[in-house]
């Protein structure tokens, strides 16, 4: 599904990703962990096509297509979704209107007719229930006046509605209390299928207690320095990230 | 993304194209350029006007000259008023084919085609149902639809010229009572040289069954448009009025100095909506209409209501403050406005709410949108007189900025002459951020649509006040206007 090869990327002329490799297959859940500044959020931004980031080298293939030249909305059309670490507020645009527009645009990209209102409403009710998203929240403007937890739940609600093939969750667990974390994780677990994949970007192991990853990667100085199964997350929790400093600079990516 | 990049991206969005810039090739009767007593007399003569009207015009002309000599052009506005050479303008331009009053089907096909191209079908078969249209082309009204249907209810809807002939008493009684010829320099000029416009009278207790509308088209070069609109709603009547306007794309600036007067008698209601889309000039600010308009209504009787809704997307410079004099007790007024400025456009717009009667209420919702190097100023006066016991006003004044090279300014004036008055003022300024655009992009929505979504969301409260068909049009217009504003 996703093959990232030797990816280098800069932001404000500063190189952040320095040869990232990652392969994701349908049905898999990958966790990318690492200390602050290792390039975790940059990875999410580059995958989703944030214009503030420049790819200087390497490739990102998504189902046999190099997506580096695709615009963010085209990547969304291809089925790449990013749950934002800091979802923005857009006053005046209702959640519902926004979702309908987004679904309509993505369907149009795929050459599908607009979704029937009836089907949309039915689907929304279902997903609303899954994320315990009240009518009151649904009726408000997009994220306006939402608490941190409500915003994160809205991200996962959108994920549920847009049904992407690849979902990247950028520090979705940060700022969540235990109840919200459970709701969000439960939502993600329900959405997992053999056809889609998830990349969880997180600083802490906490999220991985709720969403069990198939693979865990440690990102450090812009490349993946270790990969393993979920046990690796436990090890990181116990050891912290300090040991990374002792790694030789020339360490090659083992992924 | 660094700031320079952001600006570039935002820049490229603001260069949408003007769709109505074509010119109609038609034989015209045009007065030579220049302004003098002779010009005023020639216009009056062409229209075969009664003596009193010519006198009124000449008084206005003298006042115009006096203002020009003693005070010069106004300087209080938030922009530098470009020099206007009043002698370089032709004050009368009309298609040679005679206006036909009886049937729209006899109107010059070239004119019918022009209005059809503008989305205003005038022929019987194609007319918009539920909307009666008075089509004004340069200095004259060329067609008015649904006149017969309306006259069955006693509603008069016709061109201003015709009203002078057929309903002289009504015109004489109300003309200049809300916007006197001495009001300001442009109102004085308008009174002196106005050549046509629309007239509507709704009799006592009648609810006008359709939208009345005037569509203004400037076509001729080197000319100005100085139309006059007078709407009178008699006791207990109701009317919804809509005005639209476009002009060809030209390198020189053209002056549009209109006057609109609304009179609402006891318990009458007038809703007046404007979708202003005059040619705004090109991206470097070359050409475009100077839209210097005086619009005012009076709630003359008790319980009268007047509401102004405006969507201002065109013109190089817009200068207008549709106001209401709340004279009758318990009368109320509303002003809803969206003003967009992009490229080098300037808008200095707002309202004047003059509370004179007891328990009068007014509500002002102003939404400015600035993009490119556009400058948007809200200027509003809320005045409550000594006898305006329990007068109330609520003002909300919001500014939306797209990019970092535009400007938004607010100039609220409040005058309260008695202690029972309650006046509230709220204001916000927000910017469409690159992060908001990216968020919507990431959800599959391209940048143009993302901006349209945000802008329409922001403008919703005002758009909701437009008659339905026009709200949809206005929504599209907002999207088109901002096409290219963010990229």
Image: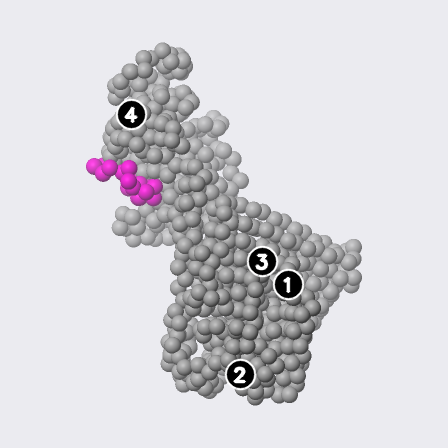
| Observer-nearest of B126 and B321 | B321
Q: Residue at x 41, y 54 (%)?
A: B15
Labels 2 and 3: the sequence-earlier one: 3
- Tell whether position A75 is magenta: yes
**Mark-to-mark CA distance, 2 and 1:** 42 Å
Pointers 2 and 4 within a single chain? no
On the image, the x and y values in percent for residue B70 come to: 69, 68
- Whether pointer 2 and pointer 4 mark residues with C-beta atoms closer than 8 Å, the reply is no
Closer to viewer: mark 2 or mark 4: 4
Q: Which mark is residue A19?
A: 4
**Mark-to-mark CA distance, 1 and 4:** 65 Å
Which residue range is magenta in the image? Answer: A63-79
**Mark-to-mark CA distance, 4 and 3:** 56 Å
Q: Which mark is residue B74?
A: 1
Q: Circle 4 sits in a helix, a strand or a loop, which is it?
A: strand
Labels 1 and 3: the sequence-earlier one: 1
**Mark-to-mark CA distance, 2 and 4:** 79 Å
- Seen in the picture, residue A90 relative to B61 is either above or below; the reply is above
- Which quadrant of the figure has residue B418? bottom right
Labels 2 and 1: the sequence-earlier one: 1
Closer to viewer: mark 4 or mark 3: 3
Q: Residue at x 31, y 44 (%)?
A: A74
Q: Please state the chain letter of the residue tagged with numbered disc 1 in the rendered image.
A: B
Q: Which mark is residue B151?
A: 2
- Which quadrant of the figure has residue A63? top left
Is residue A144 found left or right of A217 in the rendered image? Answer: right
Identity of the residue furthest to the left in this view: A64
């Amino acid at each position: 599904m996703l093959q990232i090869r030797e990816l280098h990327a800069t932001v404000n002329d500063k190189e952040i990703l320095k040869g990232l490799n990652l392969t994701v297959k349908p049905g898999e859940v990958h966790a990318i962990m690492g200390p602050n500044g290792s390039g975790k959020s940059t990875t999410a931004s580059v995958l989703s096509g944030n214009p503030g980031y420049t790819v200087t080298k390497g490739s990102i293939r998504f189902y046999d297509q190099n997506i580096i030249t695709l615009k963010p909305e085209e990547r969304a059309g291809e089925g790449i979704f990013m749950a934002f670490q800091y979802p923005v507020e857009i006053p005046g645009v209702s959640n519902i209107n926004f979702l309908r527009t987004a679904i309509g645009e993505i369907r149009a990209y795929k050459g599908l007719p607009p979704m029937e209102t009836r089907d949309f409403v039915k689907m929304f009710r279902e997903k609303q229930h899954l994320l315990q998203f009240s009518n009151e929240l649904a009726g408000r403007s997009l994220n306006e006046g939402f608490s941190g937890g409500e915003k994160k739940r809205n991200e996962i609600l959108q994920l549920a509605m847009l049904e992407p093939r690849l979902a990247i969750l950028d520090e979705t667990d940060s700022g969540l209390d235990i109840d919200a974390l459970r709701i969000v994780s439960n939502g993600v677990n329900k959405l997992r299928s053999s056809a889609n994949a998830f990349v969880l970007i997180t600083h802490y192991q906490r999220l991985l207690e709720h969403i069990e990853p198939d693979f865990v990667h440690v990102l450090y100085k812009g490349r993946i320095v270790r990969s393993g199964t979920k046990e690796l997350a436990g090890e990181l929790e116990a050891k912290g990230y300090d040991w990374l400093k002792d790694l030789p600079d020339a360490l090659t990516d083992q992924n | 993304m660094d700031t320079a990049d952001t600006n570039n991206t935002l820049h490229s969005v603001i260069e949408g194209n003007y769709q109505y810039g074509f010119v109609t090739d038609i034989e015209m009767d045009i007065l030579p350029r220049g302004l003098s007593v002779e010009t005023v007399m020639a216009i009056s003569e062409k229209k075969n006007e009664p003596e009193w009207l010519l006198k009124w015009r000449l008084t206005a002309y003298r006042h115009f000259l006096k203002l020009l000599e003693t005070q010069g052009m106004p300087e209080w506005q938030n922009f530098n008023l470009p020099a206007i050479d009043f002698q370089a303008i032709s004050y009368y331009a009309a298609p040679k084919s005679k206006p036909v009053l009886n049937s729209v089907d006899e109107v010059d096909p070239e004119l019918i085609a022009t209005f059809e191209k503008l989305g205003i079908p005038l022929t019987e078969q194609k007319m918009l149902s539920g909307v009666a249209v008075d089509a004004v082309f340069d200095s004259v009204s060329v067609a008015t639809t649904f006149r017969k249907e309306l006259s069955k209810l006693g509603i008069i809807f016709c061109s201003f010229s015709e009203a002078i002939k057929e309903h002289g008493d009504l015109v004489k009684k109300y003309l200049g009572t809300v916007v006197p010829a001495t009001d300001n320099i442009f109102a004085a000029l308008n009174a002196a040289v106005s050549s046509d416009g629309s007239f509507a009278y709704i009799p006592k207790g009648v609810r006008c069954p359709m939208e009345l509308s005037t569509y203004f088209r400037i076509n001729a070069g080197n000319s100005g448009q100085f139309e006059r609109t007078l709407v009178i709603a008699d006791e207990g009547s109701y009317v919804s009025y809509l005005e639209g306007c476009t002009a060809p794309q030209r390198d020189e600036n053209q002056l549009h100095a209109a006057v609109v007067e609304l009179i609402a008698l006891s318990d009458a209601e007038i809703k007046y909506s404007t979708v202003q889309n005059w040619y705004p000039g090109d991206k470097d600010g070359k050409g475009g209409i100077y839209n210097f308009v005086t619009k005012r209504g009076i709630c003359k009787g008790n319980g009268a209501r007047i509401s102004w809704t405006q969507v201002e997307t065109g013109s190089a410079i817009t200068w207008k403050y549709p106001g209401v004099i709340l004279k009758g007790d318990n009368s109320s007024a509303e002003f809803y406005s969206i003003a967009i400025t992009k490229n080098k456009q300037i808008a200095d717009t707002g309202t004047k709410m003059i509370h004179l009667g007891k328990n009068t209420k007014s509500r002002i919702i102003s939404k400015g949108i600035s993009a490119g190097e556009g400058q948007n100023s809200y200027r509003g006066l809320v005045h409550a007189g000594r006898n305006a016991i329990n007068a109330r006003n609520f003002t909300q004044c919001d500014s939306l900025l797209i990019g970092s090279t535009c400007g938004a300014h607010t100039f609220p004036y409040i005058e309260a002459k008695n202690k029972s008055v309650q006046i509230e003022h709220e204001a916000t300024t927000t910017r469409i951020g690159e992060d908001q655009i990216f968020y919507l992009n990431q959800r599959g929505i391209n940048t143009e649509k993302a901006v349209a979504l945000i802008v329409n969301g922001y403008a919703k409260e005002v758009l909701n006040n437009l008659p339905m068909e026009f709200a949809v049009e206005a929504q599209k217009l907002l999207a088109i206007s901002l096409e290219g504003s963010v990229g």
